[in-house]
């Protein structure tokens, strides 16, 4: 196998690729915000919107905004990428390994260094044994190259 191409990834591409991880990090805070807001709603409704019920429910609703804001901040932090990652990269995929190069030093990794891969609509997402994540965009691949790479990754030990 020898596949080589140059491609510039876009912000929407990264947003789709990174969405699952961002959701995992933000979800506990969003759930906490929902729980506090639900309690505030029950207090307000259960107290028939009396003054005492609202004195407790309104601060609880304001308190619910804190974890919601944290969830939003975490989401944006996780899906935002530096401009350098949007620059064109050249990928070279051979039977020996994965190589990606841009303006800086190249990244060369032998296939046995990867512990898993996941195919999405946009990319092949490769997980390195040290925990790092690498991607191979699918958009610039021809149908034959995409099929060849998928078969190669499935057959890899």
Image: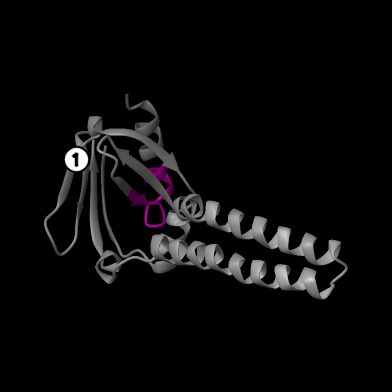
Report the magenta residues as a range: 135-146
Q: Is residue 124 above or below residue 9?
A: above
Observer-nearest residue: 84 or 152?
84
Identify which residue is drawn at 47% across, 47% down. Answer: 120
The quadrant holding residue 17 is bottom left
Callout count: 1
Q: Position of residue 11 (x, y in %)?
A: 40, 68
**Residue furthest out toward the top:** 157
The quadrant holding residue 76 is bottom left
In the rendered image, residue 28 lying in the magenta stretch gets the answer no
Compared across the picture, whether 51 is left or right of 55 comes to right
**Residue furthest out toward the right:** 48
Q: Position of residue 113 (x, y in %)?
A: 23, 33
Q: Which residue is mark 1?
A: 109
**Local SS, label 1:** strand
Picture quarter with the C terminus: top left
The quadrant holding residue 43 is bottom right
Q: Position of residue 135 (x, y in %)?
A: 34, 49
Identify which residue is drawn at 62% across, 72% down. Answer: 62
In the rendered image, residue 144 lying in the magenta stretch gets the answer yes
Label 1 CA crowd tier, 10 Å (few <14, some 14–19, many 20+):
some
């Amino acid at each position: 196998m020898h596949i080589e191409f140059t491609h510039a990834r876009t912000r929407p591409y990264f947003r789709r690729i990174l969405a699952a991880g961002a959701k995992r990090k933000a979800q506990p805070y969003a759930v906490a915000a929902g729980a506090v807001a639900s309690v505030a709603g029950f207090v307000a409704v259960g107290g028939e919107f009396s003054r005492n019920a609202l004195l407790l429910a309104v601060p609880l609703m304001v308190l619910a905004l804190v974890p919601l804001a944290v969830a939003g901040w975490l989401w944006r932090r996780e899906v935002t990428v530096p401009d350098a990652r949007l620059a064109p990269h050249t990928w070279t995929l051979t039977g020996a390994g994965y190589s990606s190069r841009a303006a800086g030093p190249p990244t060369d990794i032998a296939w046995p260094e990867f512990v898993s891969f996941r195919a999405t609509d946009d990319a092949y997402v490769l997980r390195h044994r040290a925990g790092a994540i690498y991607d191979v965009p699918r958009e610039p691949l021809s149908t034959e190259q995409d099929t060849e790479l998928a078969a190669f990754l499935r057959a890899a030990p």
